[in-house]
Image (cartoon, helix red, strand yellow):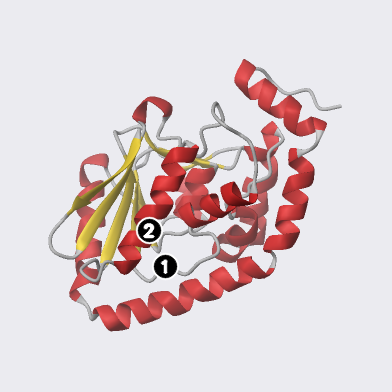
Amino acid sequence: MSITLTSNGPHIVLVTIDNPSKANAMSRDMLADLAEVWENLERDTTCRAVVLTGAGDRAFSAGADVSGDLSASEETAATINRALLKTRAFSKPIVAAVNGVCLGGGIELLLAADIRYAVPHSTFGLPEVKWGIYPFGGAAAKLATQIGYVHAMNLLLTAENIDANEALRVGLVNELLPAEDLMDRALATAGLIAANSPMAVQAVKQFVSSGLAEQVHRREAREQELGDAVRASADFREGIAAFRERREPDYT
């Protein structure tokens, strides 16, 4: 399991979340690697556009790998923020190619992408509250801004998945494409971006993404407070136990 980088021409980098046996769920180590990838690409003067996808044909990313370490610390929170581009502006445009399941942290990573294509069999959801987890990766802060209040709250509070057609309807993705056309379209769009003035493109991206990042950052302390209370609760312990035991949670 890893984050892999592939060069597609002189100015386009393909970033792949590679853990297909677990629907491309991201471990703590993978999140740390992804954070480093963004920092390296920010400094890479040859990179003008990024295409982001998941390995295989089943999943973009099922989010965090909750079978692993679930401890919390300031350092862990900072790593997650950097990996999901939650509170920082990233100057290189990101085109997402959603090739299947996109859940939890997968959606939170998707929210950092500027243009989003998906295959018709993709599913999208934020299951955190079902399992007693607070969505720390930015969904609570960003989603309403991107797709509107009622659509965001439906995803955040019901923990139910939506299909690709609904994701298109509410504006979570730009377009649905057959699986065989997905990567070609994503790379072609990245190519169009990379052919434009990198100075102008990155100035626009920096302005838009910095506005979103500043908004999230202003409320970060309050979100951390609320999320920490959830993590310390009996609901969190029951939810994680239920998830790992593959049963429905029983909240009392």
Residue in the foreground of this view, choosing between 142 and 144: 142
Task: Give the residue type at disc 1.
Answer: Phe
> Which residue is at 65% across, 47% downward?
156
On the image, the x and y values in percent for residue 125 come to 55, 41
Does the image show residue 159? no
> Which residue is at 62% across, 71% downward?
215
Left or right for 190, reference 82? left
Task: Give the residue type at disc 2.
Answer: Trp
On the image, the x and y values in percent for residue 244 come to 61, 20
State the residue position of label 1: 90
Residue at the extreme left = 9
Quadrant into which the C terminus falls: top right
Mark 2 or mark 1: whose residue is earlier in sequence: 2
State the residue position of label 2: 38
Image quadrant assignment for residue 247: top right
Quadrant into which the N terminus falls: top left
Residue in the foreground of this view, choosing between 58 and 46: 46
